[in-house]
Amino acid sequence: MVDFMEKEYYIIFPNVENGLKLNELLKDKKIPATIVPAPREATKCCGISLLIKNKSDIQLVKEYIADNDVEILDIFETIDKRDPMRNKFC
Amino acid sequence: MEVKSKMSDYREMWKNLGMNLELHDQLCQVLPEAFGDVYLTQDNRPESMDYYNFVVSEIHGVRPAELIEHQKKGGKVFGTFCVYVPDEIVFAADAIATGLCGGSQFWVSGGEKVLPANTCPLIKASVGARLDRTCPFFRIADMYVGETTCDGKKKAWEILSEDVPMHIMDIPQMKRPKDIDAWADEIKIFMDKVEEFTGNKITPEKLSAAIKLINDKRRALERLYAFRKYENLPISGKDVLVISQIAFYDDPARFTLMTNKLCDELEKRVKNNISVFPAGTKRIMLTGTPLAVPNWKLHHIVETSGAAVVVEEMCTGTRYFENLVDETKDTIEGQINALADRYMKINCACFTPNDGRIKDILRLAKEYDVDGIIDVNLKFCGLYDTEGYKVEKAVKEAGIPVLGIETDYTDQDAEQLRTRIGAFVEMLGNKQYI
């Protein structure tokens, strides 16, 4: 199923500092990334992750992570399951 | 942006705060999905919303960690529930004022253990968040500051005060000159309490700086709201709502900086005629009771029903930032009177009469060029519900279509609200009022 749908990627970090550091780096390089709450399937921690929506960017993102000593816990691959007509509230 | 926390796994911090980790984890489970569905499904959001995404993602992490750091240095934290409590006094004593939890159904059942079921969800959620130990802000605050804006709150304070030191501010019920004087007295009593509790003297210089600090936050929010007056809306109502909600928790100076940064981006959007809604989208004002974080229900339904929320005449809206405190006073007495004057301009339904609120609604309808008004009140809020009669009558007389809604934090009425709001938006025709 996943193969036929649009993939997206959440970068999971051990701490806020590394998340913000990568976000700044990607902004400088004009690579679209959005700070979002880390999805529960990816981590049990309440905290930030970076959402990368373009599959074509992910290789470059990995290189920036390695070249700039950004500490990450995981790159979580999933599909966009968001429901814009959500009728459930938290 | 400068943040002082480096943690991402906050479980140790929450454990040290005596929180119920298992129960709190249930909230952590639902927030990412809800935020994703409500916020990340929007097209063309401003890039600077990243900061507020960050704050929501870390809502029980970064800011609580900063508050704990402040306490480690000997500082105090005051938790507040109402826009009538003057934050300026707290910050002038080198303490921090913060909002507390109260916007989720998750906390309501905890409140119902001690409160009647027919209490408004905001109060039930606040008490539940404290008693169930699932809100770090409630665990951190050294003192809660309550007020007498409604009967439900007054009795809730008595329950909360069994657990934590509370100071209650007696809000007048009318707005005669003697009531404004009485509110100035209340602010003075609060100042004495804050000085005693923190051990810090409030000088005119310190109070002046705190007045400027909070006024700057108001100016930033006013600037933000002004972008919603344009025909092309550069930002959604949902996004402004979450910013207004965050204003209650965030470091005020940082919040002002980041909100002005967002406004710089919106200024460019306005120049380029960028709108996040299709041309002709109907413009809605929400008026009524506050929408505490993470209560995004009404905005989400409205903005996925072919309309845009362009202004909120609410405590999480214009009541929070309109009117500045006079910054020219240089004595404590003059400053307290200036504070009393500004805060008594907030038109809450706890006052009688409260015609000022109706004037505000009619003024805002013109300023923001609204097509329709939704008067939305939390269930069991007798004050706002009763005042709805006069509000709806006045706006109908002005020729503005109005829909009255009573709701809570549950999902049960979501489909029904979607149908009602969808039909309301559908019937909004050309504006007939001047």
Image (cartoon, rainbow, N blue to C red):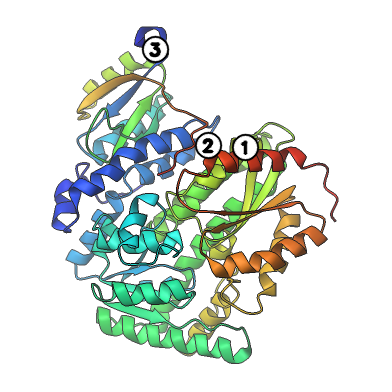
Above or below, B24 against B382 in this view is above
Q: Does residue B201 appear anywhere in the picture?
A: no
Q: CA distance from mark 2 to mark 3?
A: 23 Å
Task: Give the labeled residue for mark 1.
Answer: B269
Residue B99 drawn at (x, y percent): 38, 62
The numbered mark at residue A56 is 3
- Give the structural element (helix, strand or loop) at label 2: loop
Residue A59 drawn at (x, y percent): 31, 14
Q: Which residue appears at 26% of the width and 57% of the height?
A: B136
Above or below, A46 against B186 in this view is above
The chain letter for the residue carrying disc 2 is B
Q: CA distance from mark 3 to mark 1?
A: 28 Å
The disc labelled 1 sits on which kind of residue? Answer: Arg
The disc labelled 2 sits on which kind of residue? Answer: Pro
The answer to whether B372 appears left or right of B137 in the picture is: right
Q: Does residue B315 appear anywhere in the picture?
A: yes
The chain letter for the residue carrying disc 3 is A
Q: Nearer the viewer, mark 1 or mark 2?
A: 2
Q: Which residue appears at 19% of the width and 53% of the height?
A: B20
Task: Give the labeled residue for mark 2.
Answer: B46
The disc labelled 3 sits on which kind of residue? Answer: Ser
Q: Which residue appears at 38% of the width and 56% of the height?
A: B250
Above or below, B192 against A28 in this view is below
Q: In terms of sequence position, does the residue under pointer 1 or pointer 2 come before the other?
A: 2
